[in-house]
Image: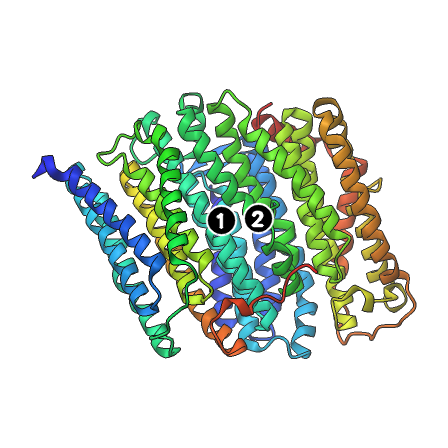
Amino acid sequence: MQALLWVLGVPLFGSLVLAFAGHRPYARDVNVVFSLGTFIASCMLTVQIVSGGPILVLAKQFFIDPLNVFMVTLTTFVGLTTAIFSRPYMRVEQDHGKMTPPRMRLFHSMYQLFGFTMLLGLTTNNMGILWVAMEAATLTTVLLVSVYRTPAGLEAAWKYFILCGVGIALALFGTVLLHMAGSKVVAVEGDALLWTNLDAVKTQLDPNIITLAFAFLFIGYGTKVGMVPLHSWLPDAHAEGPTPVSAVLSGLLLNVAMYALLRCKVLTDGALQRPLASQLMMGFGLLSVVVAAFFISRQKDVKRMFSYSSIEHMGLISFAFGMGGPVANFAGLLHMTVHSLVKSAIFFTVGQAAQKAGTQVMSEIRGLIKVNPWVGWGMMMGVMAILGMPPFGIFASEFLILTTAMREQPWATPFLFIALGVAFSSMLIRVLPMVFGEVALKPLAHPPALVPVFIHLGLALLLGLYIPPYLNGWYVQAARMLGG
Amino acid sequence: MLQHLPQLINLCATMILMLSFAMISQRRIVSLINLFAMQGAALVVASVLLAYATHQPDLYISAGLTFVLKVVLIPWLLHRMIRRMNVRWDVETLINVPTTMLVGIGLVIFSFSLALPISRLSLSLAGGSLGIALACVLLSFLMMITRSKAVPQVIGFLAIENGLIFAATTVTNGMPMIVEFGIALDVLVGVLILGVFMFQIREQFDSLDIQNLETLKEE
């Protein structure tokens, strides 16, 4: 309980402090300190949950179980490393004149507030508050994406706002329907939106209403996950915003949206006799994997390419959860973890590379390994990891997903293999010259923070070789909670 | 009085739907904002009637919130915005209003058929209004798609919210209070951010035409 209040309170307080002091030179360090505080609080919360089991606190408004506590830890961890990364990065941006002190203030304040909205969404037990938190996360990231005030940035932010705002409005309609279905069975008025209450009576929920509700929730939260065909905001927002924002968007926000979808799926599976939720998640997941893989091969902008790779991986995760069952759910959770670690690490190195080259166009970024071997190797290893090369963790999760698919959904396997093959070759073709090419890039005034990159990749490597027993137990519990 | 309440609520629902159609065909921005405020007012009346009929004090608060936000604050902000940007008397050329209306009617039929199996199960007085709420949401989508200027798009976005609040009020007698406040806060902050964006868009592109925002796409 206390730990939970710290987890939510620290970033909220941080955003207030930085709203006043975010433009000062020391604000970069303050940002890191607040992120560190949140991370420590989330570790305390994790210890509490692992030893004491799920908790339901504050008039049942907050519910922490193995599924969301693992996402809370992941979110605060990547939030911390991204804050460390953004210290020198944003300083260089300021030197280049892309960031002014007022913009720095906006950036720091919104960075903390964004963390708060995601943590609120993850920990809340109220499906309505979950919606409010997702919408608030959209609003804060819209401001973060447009922070450079360039025409392209404005366009990206506008499209992001309109598309996600509309998408998420549909999720609210779904939430209303969920409330309607719940208030028929849940006795106490006003509690019919609490997930634990709905979960307890999920078999009695009216299937007609739930079918319609899930359809709306799926479109709504699916837009935020970046499912094809509602993905078009995602590459724009990733490419035009500052790199730390791309890292947290890909690494964290998509995960939180997926988490919202999973909570809805558990209820829907309980209420319906048909596997509607599974079929939708598998179908659109597969479509996302295939379409994104082919779009990867056509990109010229490095951040756009990696954002399409995020769509591909979110599709894969969605497909895994759609198949259901203990193995696929386990693989989905593992894939979420490793993808968010690896993808944010990649964006860190991409940010450094783009800063050195002064452009995000891939054909103009060359010879990273000569300019700074750490950046070069970091990117190379990150790309190998994201493409599913052993021994990184993504290999393990993709292996599990593919073998389960072969056994349970054989029709889908050719599509998956083709898509993964296309993504593999087209990404490697573009990354190799960027890393090993011949042209020298100019050095930067401030040495980049590369520790986060290698911590992330090290963890991804560790998860590929050996999953610690407590983490394993945690995944298994969460996978069991997801049903199957 | 009491036996007429369901009819009165249904009347409000019809008004809301009519106003959605009116917004689709309205060319002048200033009238569009007024129509939006009227839709908000109809929503408030519906909520108050429902609150009176079901004796739920929460619904009065929700109605008050809608009144402050959707009838007073946001229309005032929008009026101020268009005055400062000198687009007050802008007239938008709408292509093919009759076709849009026909598509709109199709959407209404679709929403009603979608809501029919569910609205029979509704506990509330105005169970049939689920179809109307859904129709309002879809009609506002249609408006956002057909408009190319920034202000009408924003109004479309807000009209979607109107439809949703109407659904929440009539179908389930309102969401829990804390959720209502959260939604209201999100909407207000969203409008403020969109307002700032509109000024920036005009600064960058010299117009509020969203068709200028077309550089980011796949070749």
Host chain of mark 2: A
Helix or strand or loop: what does disc 1 sit on? helix
Q: Which one is in front, A76 or A264?
A: A264
Host chain of mark 1: A
Disc 2: which residue: A230
- Kindly indicate whether the residue at mark 2 contacts the one at mark 1 (C-beta within 8 angstroms): yes
In the rendered image, the quadrant that contains the C terminus of chain A is top right
Q: Residues within 10 Å of mark 2 (few under 14, many from 20)?
A: some
Q: Where, by quadrant of the figure, is residue B35 drawn?
A: bottom left
Work out how far the residue at label 1 is from the one at label 2, CA to CA, in angstroms: 9 Å
Q: Percent position (x, y) of residue B19?
A: 28, 54
- Looking at the image, tell me whether mark 1 or mark 2 is earlier in sequence order: 1
What residue is drawn where x is 17% and y is 44%? Answer: B49
What residue is drawn where x is 53% and y is 71%? Answer: A105
Q: Which one is in front, A175 or A385?
A: A175
Q: Percent position (x, y) of residue B217?
A: 64, 61
Q: Relative to A57, is B121 on the left or the right?
A: left
Q: Which one is in front, A99 or B30?
A: B30
Q: Relative to A414, is A277 on the left or the right?
A: left
